């Protein structure tokens, strides 16, 4: 496994989402950078190690609490090995499968942010139905981002970085993991954006041209 070295970041968005200008250039071409691949692998292994460590601790405490026969010990080991295999498949296995193509997807449009049970700001259209919501458990207690027809889970730093600059963004993500790897703010009124340079827009026309209400404009002004 290639080691991941934490890069130097130029702004709050780069720090929050752990990407660099070099990573973004690769993402604009539809590719994951090697640094992003290494980071996602490291995160998957860290999660796996935490799960295995917790299972090992449970097993050790169980052995201390009672004297187990050979048969009971075998059952205990089986009960610990099964979730360890499950954790491996759903952390490292899924990550490696998602990274095998070394590609990213992109969605573009106005960002909407929410936390917990609070509604999105700016408000979402009434007919908003996300393509993918990611992990369902505990979703309503998390920081969230909605953009175009996608919905993502954020951590606190990512939420705060985006909330400082509402507007239009390109969001680059790994589809299978529904994991954001980079974000890029843009102004849809600029000629180079409208021409597709340097940003190739793939959003519905109504996302770019839709009029903002007074509340949305106030959020954009910050």
Image (cartoon, grey):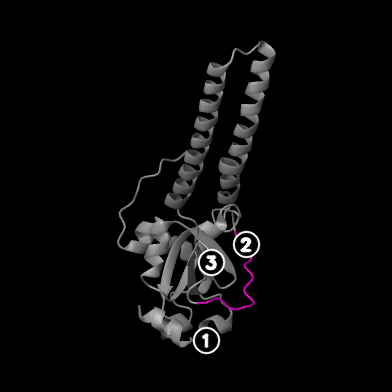
Instruction: Tell me which numbered mark, 3 or 2, is placed earlier along the sequence.
Output: 3
Q: x%, y% of residue 206?
A: 57, 84
Instruction: Look at 30% across and 54% down and name the residue there.
Output: 8
Question: Looking at the image, is mark 1 or mark 2 nearer the viewer?
Answer: 2
Residue 148: image quadrant is bottom right
Instruction: Look at 58% across and 49% down and name the residue there.
Output: 100
Q: Which span of residues is magenta-colored? A: 123-133
Res. 90 in view: yes
Q: Main secondary structure of the magenta part?
A: loop
Question: Looking at the image, is mark 3 or mark 2 nearer the viewer?
Answer: 2
Q: Quick one: SS at disc 1? A: helix
Q: x%, y% of residue 38?
A: 45, 46
Above or below: residue 48 compared with residue 183: above
Find the distance from the CA under tag 3 to the CA under tag 2: 14 Å
Quarter holding the C terminus is: bottom left
Q: x%, y% of residue 195?
A: 48, 83
| Magenta stretch contains residue 125 | yes
Above or below: residue 122 compared with residue 74: below
Q: Dot 3: within a 10 Å radius of its alpha carbon, few (fewer than 14), some, or many (20 or more) residues? A: many
Q: Give yes or no for contact between labels 1 and 2 (Cβ–Cβ under 8 Å).
A: no
The residue carrying mark 1 is 209
Q: Quick one: SS at disc 3? A: strand
Horizontal side of residue 78 vs 190, given as left or right = right
Find the distance from the CA under tag 1 to the CA under tag 2: 24 Å
Q: Dot 1: within a 10 Å radius of its alpha carbon, few (fewer than 14), some, or many (20 or more) residues? A: few
Instruction: Tell me which numbered mark, 1 or 2, is placed earlier along the sequence.
Output: 2
The residue carrying mark 2 is 132
Horizontal side of residue 22 vs 63, given as left or right = left
The residue carrying mark 3 is 106
């Amino acid at each position: 496994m290639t080691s991941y070295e934490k890069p130097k970041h130029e702004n709050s968005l780069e720090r929050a989402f752990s990407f660099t200008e070099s990573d973004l250039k690769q993402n604009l071409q539809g590719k994951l950078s090697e640094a992003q691949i290494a980071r996602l692998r490291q995160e998957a292994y860290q999660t796996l190690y935490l799960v295995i460590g917790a299972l090992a601790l449970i097993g050790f405490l169980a052995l201390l609490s009672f004297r187990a026969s050979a048969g009971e010990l075998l059952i205990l080991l089986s009960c610990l090995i099964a979730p360890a295999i499950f954790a491996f498949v759903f952390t490292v296995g899924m990550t490696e499968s998602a990274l095998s193509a070394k590609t990213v997807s992109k969605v573009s449009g106005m960002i909407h942010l929410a936390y917990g049970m609070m509604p999105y700001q700016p408000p979402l259209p009434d007919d908003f139905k996300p393509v993918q919501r990611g992990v369902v458990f505990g979703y309503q207690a998390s920081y969230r981002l909605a953009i175009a027809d996608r919905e993502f889970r954020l951590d606190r730093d990512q939420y705060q970085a985006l909330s400082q600059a509402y507007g239009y963004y390109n969001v680059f993500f790994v589809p299978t993991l529904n994991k954001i790897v980079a974000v890029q703010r843009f102004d849809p009124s600029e000629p180079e954006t409208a021409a597709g340079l340097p940003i190739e827009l793939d959003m519905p026309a109504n996302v770019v041209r839709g009029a903002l209400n007074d509340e949305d404009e106030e959020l954009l002004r910050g």
